[in-house]
Amino acid sequence: MRTNRPEPHTLTGAYALDALTRADRARFERHLARCEQCAREVRALAEVTAALAVAAAAEPPAELMQRVLAAAARTRQPTVRDLMSPELEARPSGGVGPARLVASMTVLDSISVTAPSASATEPPGHRD
């Protein structure tokens, strides 16, 4: 009888990110000891993960929050009523255009970058 275990070759990414269950990790490490292809892929993914961690840890410009807040203050924010208006459906653009949507998402992403979480500022394993 076959169980629903993942194919070991598909677990390299999850292993590199330490996202496997204890049982899957042990099973994958046994596979990794005999599979050079997976070992190479895990090494490459570990390098990429480290590079992404360094990139994510970059400090945003000090004035970013002020620029974002000033831009938000100058921009008319649609209300829920505006967004649900039947008039928007009649417009060719369908309401809020893709450029505004992307700009809003960029602003939200920028704000999240400026407020690091506790886990990003504390050493691994740190508990209060």
Image (spheres, rainbow, N blue to C red):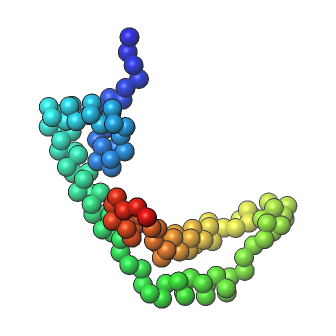
The answer to whether residue 100 is visible is yes
Specify the quadrant of the image occupied by residue 25: top left
Specify the quadrant of the image occupied by residue 80: bottom right
> How many numbered marks are there?
0
Query: Is residue 128 depicted above or below 20 in this figure?
Result: below
Q: In the rendered view, does 19 fall on the left or right side of 50?
A: right
Query: Is residue 127 depicted above or below 59 in this figure?
Result: above
Q: Position of residue 59 (x, y in %)?
A: 38, 78
Q: Nearer the viewer, residue 35 or 22?
A: 22
Q: Residue at x 41, y 23 (%)?
A: 4
Is the N terminus in the top left, top right, bottom left or bottom right quadrant?
A: top left
Q: Residue at x 21, y 31 (%)?
A: 31
The answer to whether residue 99 is visible is no
Q: Position of residue 108 (x, y in %)?
A: 56, 70
Q: Residue at x 27, y 30 (%)?
A: 27
Q: Nearer the viewer, residue 49 or 87?
A: 49
Q: Position of residue 51 (x, y in %)?
A: 27, 63
Q: In the rendered view, does 40 fall on the left or right side of 60?
A: left
